[in-house]
Image (cartoon, rainbow, N blue to C red):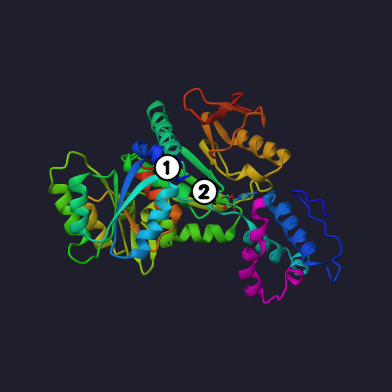
Amino acid sequence: MIEPRADTFVPRQPSPRASAKGAMGILTAILESRTGQQLAANREWRLETALKPLLRDLKFDTIEALASAALRSPDIGDQVADALLNQESSFFRDAAVLDMVADAVEAMRTDHPHRRPRIWSAGCSFGQEPLSLAMLFGEREIGRDTQPPEIVATDVSEIALTRARSGRYSQFEIQRGLPVRRMVRWFETEGNEWVANPELVRRIAFRRMNLISDPLPIGRFDVILCRNVLLYLNAELRLKVFERFATVIRPGGVLVLGAGETVIGQTDAFRPSPRYRGLYEPAHGVP
Amino acid sequence: MFASVLTQGDFMKTCLVVDDSKVIRKVARHILETLNFQVSEACDGREALDSCLASAPDVILLDWNMPVMSGMDFLRALRDSSIPTRPKVVFCTTENGMAHIRAAIEAGADEYVMKPFDRETLESKLQIVGMA
Ligand SMILES: C[S@@+](CC[C@H](N)C(=O)[O-])C[C@H]1O[C@@H](n2cnc3c(N)ncnc32)[C@H](O)[C@@H]1O
């Protein structure tokens, strides 16, 4: 078994006839070494389906061939990790939480009228999360007279980011969580696709970033959202990411996790926010 | 299982599925029942209107193109009627152009599902109208 680490990945020599199971082990270890993501047992069965398009694109006949190529080529390794990542998302996921974020941002504008709030959507997938926020800010006219809040959205997956930047969604994606009035207000149809108002997409700066190993975005943030990303990281890496967040969150800022996630028992860097139920705030002023 | 559904009957939310396709009605009924709705069916707008005048459901899942009375005609008649409640209306149709969607909202639809749909889509839309 390969011991995956976050920063380095030292492959053993692949045996030419590695069994399919062995090949799967290699591919999931590549995923973990690049992104920290451990494959949940309930997703293992999906592996082959998830890799099919890549096998086709790269013209490999077997998972074994893909695995040994991925060991030799970092680029193919990236593509494997990309294909195996869980990128499930939807518009207005946990809508009440996003409303609370918009409340918090409005309060920050009131407290600091001359400061432009900065939001970071970490693990933004196809962009539904930052776009939902941009819609909310637009509808509430936050910063209309000055500047709307700055939204930085990052993901480790280049495929996800390319999709996110395009602002294009399928009929299935557009119907998940997005109320119809918002859909007609912020999207246009183009063939079978739904395209977000370019003005809205322009309010978001999309960047590729691995939360574990890449340099953090410059400056401090008022809100960091990292929802449904850290779930399958081991405790050590999760702690590391929380500590990284603590270095870029502004005092008085909030951290937003997914519905089933918490900082409690994971890190001392954050604690439940007394003001916003379910959100977290930095535990010790400026680090 | 059946018995427990019956005893909960009074507390369950009700949904009227209006569609001229038997298959769609069956699929929708199945999904709705797993979401704990008590489901009734109508195969056109006229039948649906009669049903609503007799007893209005909480939600109506409404097809657009149907014989006898279309979904739009039904919706206008429903919103003009004097029934004491305001059922939520979720259009569920293959008409997925912007003009149709805008017209539906104008006529008083609360949500809009573009066919084909799956369980998640329907559940998501029912959540949005506060029904799931
Ligand atoms: C399940 S999606 C969640 C998307 C969105 N935040 C939401 O809650 O709907 C997880 C996203 O995190 C990204 N991700 C996973 N590991 C990452 C890492 N180490 N660095 C940056 N992004 C990562 C994945 O590519 C994927 O797009």
Residue type at mark 2 is: Ala
Density class for disc 2 (Cα within 10 Å; few <14, some 14-19, many ≥20) is many
x then y, percent, for residue A69: 76, 69
At a point 64% along the width and 54% down the height, the residue shown is A43
Report the magenta residues as a range.
Answer: A42-66
Q: Is residue A46 above or below residue B80?
A: below
Is disc 1 on the same chain as disc 2? no
The answer for how far apart the CA atoms under marks 2 and 1 are is 46 Å
Residue at which label 1 appears: B5
Density class for disc 1 (Cα within 10 Å; few <14, some 14-19, many ≥20) is some
* Number of the label disc, if any, that sits on residue A153: 2
Q: Which image quadrant: the N terminus of chain A?
A: bottom right
Number of numbered markers: 2
Residue A17, picture quadrant: bottom right
Q: Does residue A15 appear in the picture of this structure?
A: yes
At a point 51% along the width and 51% down the height, the residue shown is A89
* Number of the label disc, if any, that sits on residue B83: none
Drawn side of residue A212 relative to residue B1, left or right: right
Circle 1 sits in a helix, a strand or a loop, which is it?
helix
Q: Is residue A207 above or below residue A139?
A: below
Q: Main secondary structure of the magenta part?
A: helix
Task: Kindly identify which chain the residue marked by label 2 belongs to.
Answer: A
Residue type at mark 1 is: Val
Task: Kindly identify which chain the residue marked by label 1 belongs to.
Answer: B
Circle 2 sits in a helix, a strand or a loop, which is it?
strand
Drawn side of residue A116 relative to residue A79, left or right: left
Q: Is residue A47 magenta?
A: yes
Check mark 1 vs ligand 1: CB closer than 8 Å? yes or no.
Answer: no
x then y, percent, for residue B72: 20, 58
Front one among A286 and A83: A83
Q: Is residue B20 above or below residue A130?
A: below
